[in-house]
Image: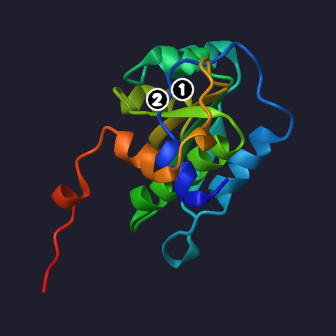
Amino acid sequence: MDTYLAIASRRDERRYAPAPLPDGVEELILDAGRLAGSAANRQPWTFAVVEGRERRERLAEGVFVPENVRSAALVVAVLVAGKGPTSFDAGRAAQNMLLAAWNAGVSSCPNGLADPERVAAALEAGAEERPVIVLSFGLPARRRDPEGLPAAEWSRRANRRPLAEVVRRLR
């Protein structure tokens, strides 16, 4: 898929089909995160794949929309450690994972932390680690054909402020 088409057509999806991800897709998603750039190549992230039902339930109770975590085929929490722009670096890794998933036909949603301490406990975060986002992935409950529309039309249909409102040109 064309990169801009992937960006323009991707939407956060909170409803997943009750099916596992195709073989190899989980590794592809995680590797896309690993490949993200980071300040001074520090790679301050750890990706915690949450698999057990009890642990996933404890994690779900710490995000804003617990059902996203409960119903996903794959849940990846991003933890960071160290100094510098670690949140920005984690965002780059997360966006890589979300776009790689979409390219593979997998829906996803970033889940904000309603209770960061609860999330850290569920993830057994180390003393220097802090969770920054929980990503949920699954096959979409409702299929969307990204190539069914040109990227410009996906962009037009996006629920976003117009470009003229978000760009400030300084001369």
Badge 2 amino acid: Val
Q: Is residue 27 left or right of residue 135?
A: right
For the residue pair 143 and 156, the one nearer the viewer reads as 156
Q: Position of residue 142 (x, y in %)?
A: 59, 19
What's the residue at 40%, 48% (across, down)?
155
Check disc 2 and report the residue beneath it.
119
Q: Is residue 134 visible?
A: yes
**Element type at marker 2?**
helix
User: Which quarter of the picture shows residue 88?
Assistant: bottom left
Q: Tell me which colouring the rendered structure shows.
A: rainbow
Q: Does the rendering let one see residue 127?
A: no
Left or right relative to 156: residue 60? right
Do the CB atoms of the residues marked 1 and 2 lie less than 8 Å apart?
yes
Rounded to the nearest angstrom, the CA distance separating label 1 from label 2 is 5 Å
Is 141 or 5 nearer to us in this picture? 5
Which numbered marker is on residue 165?
Answer: none
Q: Residue extending furthest left?
A: 171
- Mark drawn on residue 122: 1
Q: Is residue 143 above or below residue 157?
A: above
Q: Secondary structure at mark 1?
A: helix
Asked which quadrant contains residue 146, the reply is top right
On the rendered image, what quadrant is the C terminus found in?
bottom left
- Characterize the local packing of mark 2: few (<14), some (14-19) or many (20 or more) Cα atoms within 10 angstroms: many
